[in-house]
Image (cartoon, coloured by chain):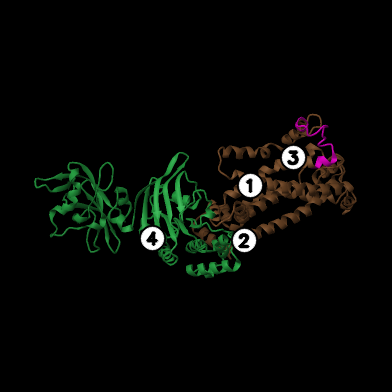
Amino acid sequence: MAVSDVTTTSDTYAGSVRRWPITRLLEDERWLAFVLLLPTMVLLGLFIAYPFVKGVELSVTDAKVGVPGNFVGMQNFVVLLNDSIFRVAVWNTVVYTAVTTVFKLALGLWLALLLNRNFKGKALTRAFILLPFIIPTVLSTFAWKWMFDPTFSVINWTLFRLGLISSRINWLGDPNLALISVIVVNIWRGVPFYAISLLAGLQTINPELQDAAAIDGAKPWQRFWYVTWPLLLPVTLVVVLFSVIQTFADFQLVYVLTGGGPANATQLFATYAYQVGVGTGLLSQGAAISLAMFPVLLVVVIVQLLYIRRVETL
Amino acid sequence: MARVVIRDLNKTFDGVHAVKDVNLEINDKEFVVLVGPSGCGKTTTLRMVAGLESITSGQILIADKIVNELPPMDRDIAMVFQNYALYPHMNVYDNMAFGLKMRRFGRAEIDTRVKAAAEILGIQAQLQRKPRQLSGGQRQRVALGRAIVRHPKVFLFDEPLSNLDAKLRVQMRVEIKKIHARLGTTAIYVTHDQIEAMTLGDRVVVMRDGVVQQVGEPLELYNAPANRFVAGFIGSPAMNFATVTIAADADGLLWANNEGIHIKLPAEVASRLRKHVGENVTLGIRPEDLRVASSSDPADVAFDATVEVVEKLGSEILLDVKVGPSMMAAAVEPTVLAKVRDQLRLALNPDRLYFFDGPTQAAI
């Protein structure tokens, strides 16, 4: 209805005033919408749709580096099911994502609540909090790599000086400690994003509500639980959604710290896909590993988006 | 009994002295209004009574108990905020019930109290709605309801009507007055609107720059303002002021003179002004005490004026006139036919003249 109304109007105009054909075309909302969407469509197509389709295409062939490959159906995925390293990578990714998300949310929320208070040097502190987030990941991860180095580790040195340990701890070389170490670095890097986003969310909450709740007899934790938290929930869910997607597909951090080792103890989806697809040249197999992440992420995204919509309409 | 006593109350924020030596005794069941321009310290005073702001020095007593160190929840007060401060994620019922839930009231008691308050305020039909589904007036009712259900010792109102449109404001003003008459709870009400102050308050406290200027019943403030500030703040349209020189003639009569005014002061006024002879003082005349002079008016209570603006309000006409070098407003009968640039002769009521000391601005 609306669209045809507009068309009629623009036709009337065209009769009375002389216009360039292109102007007339753009007065039609359907064409204007298309023109305005075009740049986005091109960018999304080039950088998201094309690689995705190419990945799907590769995953059903037996292509290797330099060999175009033939269609092999689901064979690559069948291979994955029997691949014990893949199963380890799946488990590691789930643990890595779950543990880091819980800690990042808890610490980020705590920091946000602290930063939301009034104190001297508030602006400076807020800026400092962002540091781990704005330093390029590879750079900061290298710093961590030195801190975890068995010989030069500043952590070992401190613990040794404090008399807490008597021998060196091989943070990244020990299969049990390696995943924990990687998780610690991810939390360190991820907390600022949570803190700043949640702080922004906190600042949209009317401070009078805190006064009202205090007068209503709510103790500080009750004010948080009954007033602040429900109002912060929509922001929190969006932040967690972004973070889960990012963490699930994390690559740089693990690649720099351990490369997936020792003995695949820190192997994640992304590092394993890279190792197989690029490292060994089995492009099709690597593509299949990457795509195996897709259904899981899709479910996470759908569930969270539905939940966010529900919370927002409450 | 819920008397509120404020003794030598002071508040400084980062070196700004916002409230200075405020002393006030509010009796049980009394409705006291704190009024003044923005930044006069009225809201800060209220927030100190509520416990939302710390006290720099002085004492606050509620029901004869010092509450300086008590958190808001232990002061047994309820507050209505300017922006309603309703919990946006809770429906009307839960908003009103929240304070009772926090104080561990039973479900049945909560239900009775919320429904009773909803009935008083006429919001029974909105109990399941969210605040954003309500109009401004309804939200303000919910905010009132939240205060009522608690049966507190003292109600605190922080400019509760300033977000409503003019018509609704008048309506809610009447409503608040009725509720107070019905519940009889001690109330402290902050506003910058002197009409709200005059209509609601049993007593009105006028504040300026953190200092109490005058405390009194509404008509006391209107009829006997303590200083020029109170005189100008209370009453609408505001009182006219002109600088005059007090002169004594050969018969010992006193006159107030300036370039446009030459009026004889009645004996009662003259006795107070005798020691100011030869000095400049501020003369105050309320617009409603001016009228168009008739032939029977003696010359020594009238002066010439030039009309500059005519505002027809229906019940009266407001004239902005030029008298000598200064401007004055006069509220005259609606039948007066005055046009811009007309020359008029205005008469005043010599018994309703106000004089303020030149340097101190205190009433003489």
Q: Is residue B246 magenta?
A: no
- Same chain under badges 3 and 2? The reply is yes
Q: Which is more N-terminal, label 2 or label 1?
A: 1
In front here: B215 or B298? B215
Position of B276 relative to A164 (above/below): below
The span from disc 4 to disc 1 (Cα, nearest Å) is 45 Å
Q: Which is more N-terminal, label 2 or label 3?
A: 3
The span from disc 1 to disc 3 (Cα, nearest Å) is 20 Å
Q: Chain of mark 2?
A: A
Q: Chain of mark 4?
A: B
Q: Chain of mark 3?
A: A
Q: Which chain is depicted brown? A: A
- Same chain under badges 4 and 1? The reply is no
Residue at x 44% of width, y 49% of height? B45
| Quarter of image, res B163 | bottom left
Q: Which mark is residue B200?
A: 4
| Quarter of image, res B127 | bottom right
Look at mark 2 in the image and give the residue it sits on: A313
